[in-house]
Amino acid sequence: MKLITISGLDGSGKSTQIELLKEYLNSKNKKFFYFHAIEFSLANKITTKKSSDSKSVAKANFFQIILRRIFLMIDLFRFKRLLKKLEKQEFDYLVSDRYFYDSIINIYYLSKKDKRIPCEKFISKPAVAVYLDADPEMIMQRERKPDQGMEYLQKKKELYDAKFSSWNMKKIDGNQEKEEIFKEIRNLI
């Protein structure tokens, strides 16, 4: 089973590319499983407000950051179990809209540090890992823009730019038309 991940800033087009990828794999009669690391995370399940107008997390205290790190480690082991289960069920692909790399970037952002987080070494290595490198200014001009604002996007972009190569991610210009981006993603598969 091939693990394909798409990461990047909020509003960079990850979900759009995942939908195109799902359509493509369906057209090829491939069996795939959709995964979203943030939705999968225990920290998200515990901290997410039930309100539909809740804002994204852009600040956290020391205790909340420690809990996120602990939950991330638990999530990584839960994910390994999920992979084994999917392999037994003979899935061809696991397609991830966001991945644990995005969780790591979020922890870096919240803690205001980019020191290596020990559990990074337990992240299952994708066959294809994509970083959609979108310009924060372009993202903020879109109709659906992230609620965290420009400063948040700029800082997270700095973090992604510093980390993507160490995670062996393929950087794709996220400012292109969605069809051009998908062409590049499809060529990686």
Image: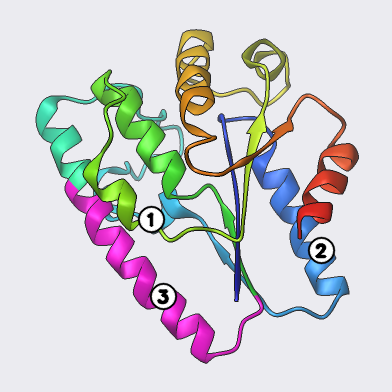
Residue density around tag 3, few if under 14, some if 14–19, many if 20 or more, within 10 Å: few
The picture places residue 32, in percent across and down from the top left corner, at: 66, 74
Q: Report the quarter where the C terminus lies.
A: bottom right
Residue 44 visible in the shown view = no
Regarding mark 2 in the picture, which secondary structure is present there?
helix
Residue type pointed to by label 2: Glu
Could you tell me if the residues under marks 2 and 1 are in contact, i.e. CB atoms within 8 Å? no
Could you tell me if the residues under marks 3 and 1 are in contact, i.e. CB atoms within 8 Å? no
Of the pair 58 and 115, the residue shown nearer to us: 115
The reply, left or right, for residue 17 in relation to residue 85 is: right
Q: Residue 49 in magenta?
A: no
Q: How far apart are the two marked residues, 3 and 1, measured between alpha carbons?
A: 13 Å
Residue type pointed to by label 3: Leu
Secondary structure mostly seen in magenta is helix
Q: How far apart are the two marked residues, 2 and 1, measured between alpha carbons?
A: 27 Å
Of the pair 38 and 154, the residue shown nearer to us: 154
Residue density around tag 2, few if under 14, some if 14–19, many if 20 or more, within 10 Å: few
Q: Residue sitting at 22 percent across and 25 percent down?
A: 60
Circle 1 residue: 123
Q: Residue sitting at 65 percent across and 14 percent down?
A: 140
In the image, is residue 150 above or below residue 169?
above
Q: Residue sitting at 32 percent across and 47 percent down?
A: 120
Circle 3 residue: 82
Q: Quadrant of residue 131?
A: top right
What's drawn in magenta, residue-wise?
Answer: 70-92
Regarding mark 1 in the picture, which secondary structure is present there?
loop
Circle 2 residue: 23
